[in-house]
Amino acid sequence: MPRKPPAADSFRDYVYARGPALSRAALLLTGDPHLAQDLVQQTLIGVASRWERILAGGDPDAYVRQALYHQHILWWRRWRREPVPVELLPEPAGFDPHGSLVTTIVVRQALGRLAPKQRAVLVLRYFDDLTEAQTAAVLGISVGTVKSQVRDALARLRVVAADLVDPQEVPR
């Protein structure tokens, strides 16, 4: 009979397997690589103490993803109470072998102009490739709310990042 791995080993394996996807989602939510690392670490610290119960629930990935998005919302609420800097420094440009750096920066900036829930819905639907039902479950909202948030967020993106919209794709 195979021995069940201890919770610590299971958690470590999960972090190795899903860490990059969590980091990517956190980066899209925060728009800052350092804040994204902090967000993932803070989320994983909170999840680690409950790992055995999370595994017993059956779908640890959904739980961790939900914890990540909820942690981001908590951070965002705290940051709104703090003073906002008058001028933000531009993100330093780096070497991009694929030529998509400008698009990446524009997408990050555009996502940063959305409300946190709209940003979370877009990241879950289009970057994490979740269904509407899965997105609703992660965020604890209804499928109808997911649909309306996606609609509103995409409309807002068309305004704040008009250079990303392909004129041939826009219905007339």
Image (tube, helix red, strand yellow):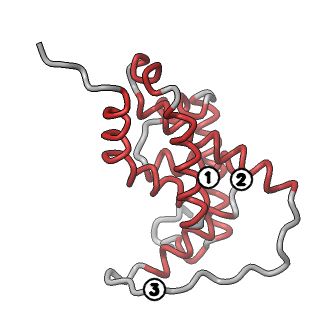
Between discs 3 and 2, the one toward the N terminus: 3
Q: Residue at x 41, y 29 (%)?
A: 60
Labels 3 & 2 near each other (Cβ < 8 A): no
Kindly identify the amino acid type of the residue bearing the numbered disc 2: Ala
| SS at badge 1 | helix
| SS at badge 3 | loop
Q: Is residue 63 above or below residue 109?
A: above
The location of residue 54, given as percent across then percent down, is: 46, 23
Labels 1 & 2 near each other (Cβ < 8 A): yes
Q: CA distance from mark 1 to mark 2?
A: 6 Å
In the picture, the disc for residue 94 is 3
- Residue on which disc 2 sits: 115
Labels 3 & 1 near each other (Cβ < 8 A): no
Residue 84, picture quadrant: bottom right
- Residue on which disc 1 sits: 119
Q: Is residue 113 left or right of residue 26?
A: right
Front-most of residues 136 and 11 = 11
The location of residue 140, given as percent across then percent down, is: 61, 28
The location of residue 8, given as percent across then percent down, is: 37, 32
Mark 1, other Cα within 10 Å: few <14 / some 14–19 / many ≥20: many
Mark 2, other Cα within 10 Å: few <14 / some 14–19 / many ≥20: some
In the picture, the disc for residue 32 is none
